[in-house]
């Protein structure tokens, strides 16, 4: 049995049928990237960075994968493209966005990939769904739990958990 890597992903989007797009992303991630072991509820947040657009839905996932972090990134980007993602505007509207937030307890600094995600501690829309599925997960650089990071988060955007 090959060693399984554990990764936490944040998926989100604000174009089209947002719930359906996230559902399709979870299915594609499970098929192409690794086994989805946990998923948070859906959370709605006003757009961050570029605020003149529709609110985002976000969801946190825990997956187990045989891929390395760079390989996982490659497959995640393929999933985004297959679901219609076009990268033309920073922080702009998008049908789907998939970020690798944590990968095992690894600290990775490559030109194309930084793990842990360098802004996770500053984004309530990422921390709230992560806290639902992994409140005690420790940030390998900041040495604080997701719960603690959420309590200290400077982001004031409201994050609303959708009813199931």
Image (cartoon, helix red, strand yellow):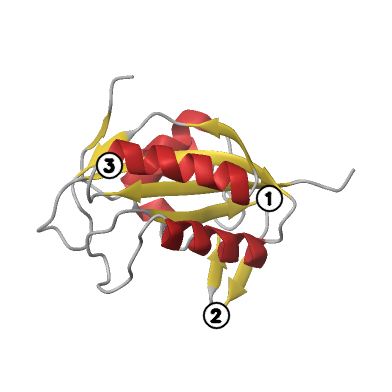
Dot 3 alpha-carbon crowd within 10 angstroms: few under 14, some 14 to 19, many 20 or more: some
Q: Secondary structure at mark 2?
A: loop
Rendered residue at 43%/42% (across/down):
24
Q: Earlier in the sequence, mark 2 or mark 1?
A: 1
Residue 93 horizontal/vertical position (percent)? 22, 59
Q: Earlier in the sequence, mark 2 or mark 3?
A: 3
Q: Which residue is mark 1?
A: 104
Q: Which residue is mark 2?
A: 111
Residue 107 visible to the viewer: no
Q: Mark 2 or mark 3, which is nearer to you? A: 3
Residue 20 horizontal/vertical position (percent)? 33, 38
Dot 1 alpha-carbon crowd within 10 angstroms: few under 14, some 14 to 19, many 20 or more: some
Q: Secondary structure at mark 3?
A: helix
Instruction: Name which quarter of the figure residue 52 lies in.
Output: bottom left
Disc sitting over residue 17 in the figure: none
Rendered residue at 90%/43% (across/down):
1
| Camera-nearest residue between 157 and 55 | 55
Residue 8 higher or lower than 42, as above or below: below
Q: List the single residue furthest toward the bottom.
A: 111
Q: Are marks 2 and 1 in contact (CB under 8 Å)?
A: no
Q: List the single residue furthest toward the left.
A: 52
Q: Are marks 1 and 3 in contact (CB under 8 Å)?
A: no
Residue 25 horizontal/vertical position (percent)? 45, 45
Dot 2 alpha-carbon crowd within 10 angstroms: few under 14, some 14 to 19, many 20 or more: few
Q: Which residue is mark 3?
A: 18
Which corner quadrant holds the C terminus? top left
156 to the left or right of 137: left
């Amino acid at each position: 049995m090959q060693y399984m890597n554990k990764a936490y992903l944040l998926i989100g989007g604000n174009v089209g049928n947002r719930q359906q797009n996230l559902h399709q992303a979870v299915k594609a991630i499970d098929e192409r990237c690794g086994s989805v072991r946990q998923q948070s509820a859906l959370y709605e947040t006003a757009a961050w960075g570029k605020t003149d657009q529709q609110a985002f839905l976000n969801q946190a996932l825990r997956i187990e994968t045989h891929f390395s972090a760079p390989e996982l990134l490659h497959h995640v980007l393929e999933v985004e493209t297959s679901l219609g993602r076009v990268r033309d505007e920073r922080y702009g509207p998008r049908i789907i966005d998939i970020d690798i937030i944590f990968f095992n307890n690894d600290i990775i600094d490559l030109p194309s990939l930084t793990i842990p995600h360098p802004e996770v501690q500053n984004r309530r829309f990422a921390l709230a769904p992560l806290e639902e599925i992994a409140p005690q997960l420790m940030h390998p650089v900041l040495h604080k739990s997701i719960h603690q990071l959420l309590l200290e988060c400077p982001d004031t955007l409201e994050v609303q958990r959708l009813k199931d």
